[in-house]
Image (tube, grey):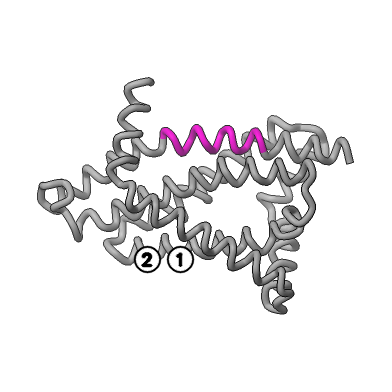
Amino acid sequence: MNDLFKEAIKVLLKIKKIIFFIAILYVLSFFIGFLLIAIENPFAIQFKNFIIEFISTYQPFSYVLEALKSGNILQAIIFTFLYNLISGAFLSTTLPGLLPFIGAIFISLVTFLRGLMIGITYYEIFENFNLLTIVALGTLFLELSAYVFSASAGINISLSIIFPEKYSINKFEAFKKSIKDALKIYLIVIILLIFGAMWEMIGIFLVAFFK
């Protein structure tokens, strides 16, 4: 396990420029969304209301809320982890990388939109510092770190065929090597999302309990 973790770290260091790009994209889009709500932009407010309604009614999210209301924290943690891993990380930020170049553009767009949505919906949480703010900060750090790595893995796959010289091998071999690198990266992604789901669900439960 220790060797696998070291291998994952080596891969992350190898694609550190992509990781930096994705991280900057998240930060930039977050502050744009945050600023739009701060200046009471009509579109941003309408978009925020849509997101909140969607989360409260859309099946995966409403399922988690019901689990928390019934006190089934473990069930909420497991479901949140699986949803974030499958939908939040793999399907939206890594799998599109199978498409050369277009996949990289799509992943970058998903990253920007996700950061924008977070900035829009988290404005009120950060406006007044309290227990929920601490929960939100921890969740953002753990889950967004995982998404930065999963998106970087996807973009690395997408660009491997276009720039195989990065691996000093032919296009097909570069493509296979980038997928193997993505699998190594996912060890860290999974760990971060497990802790992220635990922190988020236990935190929300405690916030509701002490409210």
* Front-lying residue, 183 or 113: 113
Which residue appears at 30% of the width and 35% of the height? 10
Residue 81 against residue 94 in the figure, above or below: above
The amino acid type of the residue labelled 1 equals Leu
Q: Which residues are magenta?
A: 187-199
* Left or right, residue 9 beside residue 49: left
Q: Nearer the viewer, residue 165 or 157?
A: 165
Asked if residue 3 is positioned above or below residue 189 in the image, the reply reads above
Q: Which residue is mark 2?
A: 105
Q: Quadrant of the N terminus?
A: top left
Give x and y (percent) for residue 24. 46, 57
Q: Residue at x 71, y 41 (%)?
A: 134
Crowd tier of the residue under label 1, counting other residues whose Cα lies within 10 Å: few below 14, some 14–19, many 20 or above:
some
Q: Is residue 191 magenta?
A: yes
Q: Are marks 2 and 1 in contact (CB under 8 Å)?
A: yes
Q: Quadrant of residue 188?
A: top left
Location of residue 5 by image quarter: top left
Q: Residue furthest right?
A: 211
Q: Is residue 188 magenta?
A: yes
Q: Which residue is mark 1?
A: 109
| 72 with respect to 100 (left or right) | right
